[in-house]
């Protein structure tokens, strides 16, 4: 059951002065084509790491300072892969050094988005299928809030104790220094 996230991300949000509730702006989600399992001879060339998964990123969707990107996990192995919980994410600079970024579990601390879940569920991913998780952050610059942070890569592990994938991504955190990651779904 492929649950794809790339298009879910995101709409910018503002507060309506009339009633104080968030007003969601933007376009609806775009579908993402299902992944195709490569022949076994190609598996090593596609970034397939133990335990038979490959991670990739969608394009960043940014609106009004809110940034969102989908983290996709594709089962490139030959057996079902069970995902539960949240991917582990670190932001790296251009020299691959870890930045002091607070990665929060769940996206609601960054922005509440009705289409994103914050409660993890067990997801079984068959070979060739993919799932996704959301990564949100705000790019704001406020005097006295800290140094401007700019990342060049994400270091992502599907779960604790599993190999990390280094994925190129310009992460313009501004002075906020934090991001929220949603569960695999």
Image: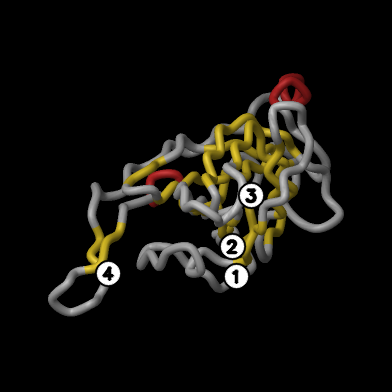
Depth check, front residue: 115 or 110: 110
Tag 3–tag 1 contact (CB < 8 Å): no
Q: Earlier in the sequence, mark 3 or mark 1?
A: 1
Residue 126 - label: 3
Q: Residues within 10 Å of mark 4 (few under 14, many from 20)?
A: some
Label ID, residue 92 = none
Helix, strand, or loop for circle 2? loop
Question: What label does residue 183 carry, if any?
Answer: 2
**Do residues under tags 1 and 2 come within 8 Å of each other at their CB atoms?**
yes
Among the 4 quarters of the image, the one containing residue 62: top left
For the question of whether residue 88 can be seen, the reply is yes
Q: Label 2: few (<14), some or many (≥20) within 10 Å?
A: many
- Mark 2 or mark 4, which is nearer the start of the sequence? 4
Q: Nearer the observer, disc 4 or disc 2?
A: 4
Left or right: 128 with respect to 163? left
Residue found at x 60% / y 42%: 149
Find disc 1 in the rendering and name its residue.
120
The CA distance from mark 3 to mark 2 is 18 Å
């Amino acid at each position: 059951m492929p649950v794809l996230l790339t298009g879910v991300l995101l709409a910018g949000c503002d507060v309506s002065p009339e009633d104080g509730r968030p007003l969601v702006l933007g376009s609806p989600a775009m579908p993402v084509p299902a992944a195709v399992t490569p022949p076994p001879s190609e598996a090593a060339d596609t970034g397939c790491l133990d335990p038979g998964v490959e991670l990739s990123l969608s394009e960043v969707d940014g609106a009004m300072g809110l940034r969102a990107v989908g983290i996709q996990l594709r089962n490139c192995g030959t057996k079902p892969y069970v995902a539960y919980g949240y991917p582990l994410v670190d932001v790296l600079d251009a020299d691959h050094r870890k930045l002091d970024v607070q990665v929060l579990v769940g996206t609601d601390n960054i922005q509440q988005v009705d289409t994103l879940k914050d409660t993890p569920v067990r997801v079984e991913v068959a070979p060739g299928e993919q799932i996704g998780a959301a990564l949100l952050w705000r790019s704001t610059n406020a005097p006295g809030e800290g140094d401007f942070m700019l990342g060049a890569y994400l270091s992502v592990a599907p779960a604790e104790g599993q190999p990390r994938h280094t994925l190129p991504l310009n992460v313009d955190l501004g002075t906020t220094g934090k991001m929220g990651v949603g569960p695999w779904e």
